[in-house]
Image (spheres, rainbow, N blue to C red):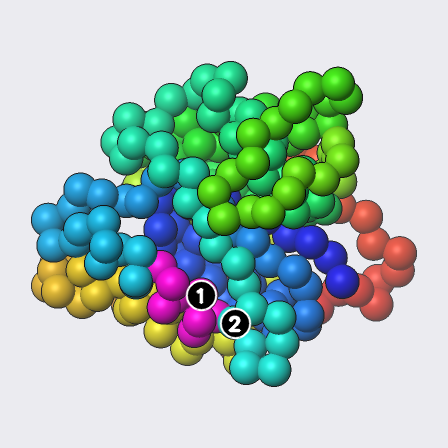
Amino acid sequence: MTRILIVGPHPDDQELGMGGTIASLAAAGHEILLLDMTDGEPTPHGNRATRAIEAQRAIEILSPPDGPPIQRVCLDLPNRYVEHSIEARHAVAGAIRAHQAEIVFTPYFQDAHPDHIATTRIVEDARFDAKLTKVDMPIPPGLMEIGSPIYPKWFFYYYATHLRWVADPSFLLDITGHLETKLASIRAYETQFVMPEKNRKVVEWVEAAATYFGSRIGVQAAEPFFTKEPIGLRDVGGLV
């Protein structure tokens, strides 16, 4: 099975952007690690302990009942102050090595949130740093050991942007059968999407977007992704 790393600036970004794909990949038996750059706090209704419980609950929802559980660790960078630095790059590179990630997902590079922009730049550079020989990388909290240098073959961007902007994806992934799981994982963040009345509409928007993108490829629901590098098909049988 494939080892996949999915990086989010804050807990809930991965679920919002690609929760259906996470559930689908996990159900297929792939080894998935969610890496949170920050704990997401402070927020109006949350706190550090509550957000950690919510983040854990979300991956329990996304994990298949009869498959390997999804892992989640937090680098604990300061929320709202994420900066592109050598230290941050090496922390993510350490996670890439420890997980031996073959595929990496990170937020789309155009965004209104500085943490999102910084995170994506960090992860892009960490992909390169992870392959460097004779350079030690730190062990991220919650991961047991550092693997050998590796350069993830595939690097994709998911959409969890704060811009009022319509995604123009490179490809869509079918999440038929996993949309309700995605929505449940988002609602697990009660302090973010249940308690604040104005944020409850976010879940509706996410559901509507999944339905719309699904309609573009003739399925019930889909999620959009972007790539700067070409994806190859062995034959047209891989097309939906």
Quarter that holds the N terminus: bottom right
Q: Secondary structure at mark 1?
A: helix
Is residue 64 left or right of 111 when viewed as pictured?
A: right
Residue 142 in the image: state x and y as whole percent.
Answer: 50, 48
Q: Residue furthest right?
A: 234
Q: Is residue 74 above or below residue 15?
A: above
Q: Does residue 152 show up magenta in the picture?
A: no
Q: Is residue 129 above or below residue 188?
A: above
Specify the segment rendered in magenta: 55-62
In the foreground, 115 or 206: 115
> Is residue 19 among what the camera can see?
yes
The quarter of the displayed image where residue 234 is located: bottom right
Q: Residue furthest front?
A: 144
Quarter that holds the C terminus: bottom right
The quarter of the displayed image where residue 238 is located: bottom right
Residue underneath mark 1: 59
Q: Any mark on residue 49, and which?
A: none
Q: Is residue 61 above or below residue 230?
A: below
Q: Work out how far the residue at label 2 is from the one at label 1, CA to CA, in angstroms.
A: 6 Å
Q: Residue sitting at 12 percent across and 60 percent down?
A: 196
Q: Any mark on residue 63, and which?
A: 2
Residue 59 in the image: state x and y as whole percent.
Answer: 44, 65
Q: Identify the amino acid type marked 2.
A: Ser
Residue 81 in the image: state x and y as whole percent.
Answer: 28, 26
Q: Does residue 60 show up magenta in the picture?
A: yes
Q: Residues within 10 Å of mark 2 (few under 14, many from 20)?
A: many
